[in-house]
Image (cartoon, coloured by chain):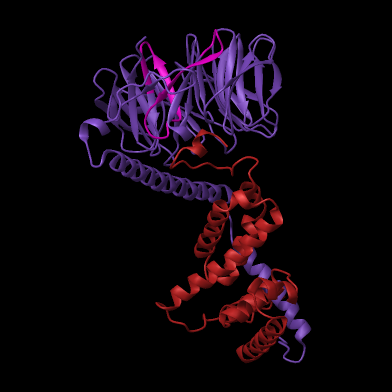
Chain colours: A red, B purple
Amino acid sequence: MDESQVCAGAVVADPPTGDLVGSLFAAHYPRLVRLAVLLVDDQETAEDVVMDAFTGLHRRRLWLRDPDDGFRYLRSAVLNGSRSKLRRRRTVRNTDLPAPPTTTGSAEEEALQRSRERELVAYVRGLPQRQREVVVLRYYGGLSEAEIAAELRISRGTVKAHASRALDALARAMEGGR
Amino acid sequence: MTTPTTQPWDLERALESALAAEADVAEIDVHAAASRLEERLDRSRRTARVALAGAAAAAVVLVVLLVQGGPDDRRSAPPAEDDRQGGQVTAVVPQGAGLTDIGQPVYRVGSDGRTAWVTDQTQRLTGVALDGGDITTRIELPGEDGSAFDVEPVGDLVWVSLRLSNVVVAVDPRTGEVVHQVRTTGDRGPFGMAVDGGDLWSTAGATLLRIDAATGDLLDTIQLPPTTRAYDVAVAGGSVWVTDVGPPFRVLRYQPGRDRLVPTLLPASPAGIAATADAVWVAMVARPELLRVDAESGLVTDRVELPGNGLAVTATGPSVWVGLPEIDQVAEVDARSRRLVRLLQVGSYPPFARQYGDMLLVTSNLGGELVRVPLGD
């Protein structure tokens, strides 16, 4: 830590030296933003959510000893923060599904594949929030059912139910969208 | 596409691929994010300090009222001076005394003998008349807001390190124009600067720069060890000394004549550094000590206990001044006796104090003020 970091209002390019929050920031910030991007609809909001998470972690830093605890806190804070942002946003926006991009029918398989992926992501964004969280944590975060249950504070059975409904809805949507 | 309601495995694979691709679209600037996080944390610290100060003030008022049975202007007025000795506060600078409101949290100050030049958290350099304390000049600097940090008047120019813009600039205070600009390498700093003869030394990332202070020519770029996070710089004993906030925590000694670099390891992360005749003095941000490093041997020879964690260090003659912002004090250590000789209670969160003749200039960071403190015997 240096003078400019200690002084109020200062900004620096690097996280504080030797600081658990700083090392967690360096290690996990991009990953958490990418997770949040999938939970909210835009990167700016996602970064805002992750910033809030790190600010909260900083307030708790004196009680943190284990980086794993810190990461778990951050992941939970990102989930909760994303949920909160979406809840607030839904009071002012149209809650329709984001319009999926139309497929171009391009002959190039790679372009077509990417187009389908975007279509699928658009449908994921339109899932009910809990289903969306389960899908993102499972298929992007790589968490097991048990880990998702612990993260979302729901039972494993509920996780399974959300996952099943989500997959079914996505499959139907993709089928219908073709 | 064969989207499979009956083949969940394919859908799951598609999901993994699609979500990963979507997440990868996000272009994430970690450095910019780190800056934003620090801004947030600083605001948070500031709010906490204001709240704490408010609570403390309320508690003091309550105690006074309880003891006195009611408000009494004469008895509750702040003391102009307190002559306690022995590691205690030796003087309290009354609020408002010698004070110039800069209007923004301030960092460092340098003077050309007539004007004190102050950097603040906006991209601004403010000139304050040493005599009288009036603001005489406001110069908007180029680059990223919040960047202006260290300041060194040299001749007719004022040099400023713009730490977020990665550039050192020289400003002509008569016109307000930038007349020289030296871009630094890397994305960290420049931070501290030091003047030695006609040379201006500055630190940035893992480099040490030597600049001709008159012409603005970059004379030399000294590559420090790759892990170095150089912060402050001082010149003593023919060597240039750089604090590396690490890890590893150390002072790097560069000997220009021999083109040699020698490290002195420290017990904690260093902050400011300043030079006296035969030594450099190093403060540490998380340890209430000032270290004396012998300029000849490069060894730590003395540790002076401080009542709080130090930050910036300056030296004028045998007086070494250390900002102790966390306790709103600045400390004077006598380089000859290697003892703490004076503590001033001054301003709000003062990181930096620098002596010119019989006047001490102190930046009151949270107060957004420059405080001019006359130093009597």
Compared across the picture, whether A74 is left or right of B193 comes to right
* Residue range highlighted in magenta: B334-361
The one of B138 and A60 positioned closer to us in this rendering: A60
In the depicted structure, whether residue B280 falls above or below residue B62 = above
| Residue B170, horizontal then vertical, whole percent | 42, 24
Image quadrant holding the N terminus of chain B, namely bottom right
Q: Nearer the viewer, residue A98 or B350?
A: B350
Classify A85 as above or below B134.
below
What is the x, y in percent for residue B281?
Answer: 57, 18
Indicate yes or no whether the magenta region holds residue B333.
Answer: no
Quadrant, the C terminus of chain B: top left
Q: Is B172 or A82 nearer to us in this picture? A: A82
Looking at the image, the residue that sits furthest to the left is B73
Residue at position x 78%, y 83% from top?
B9
For residue A121, above or below residue A141: below
Residue B153 in sight from this viewpoint: no
Q: Is residue B279 visible?
A: yes
Was residue B339 drawn as part of the magenta stretch in this picture?
yes
| Residue A119 % position (x, y) | 61, 79
Q: Quadrant of residue B306?
A: top right
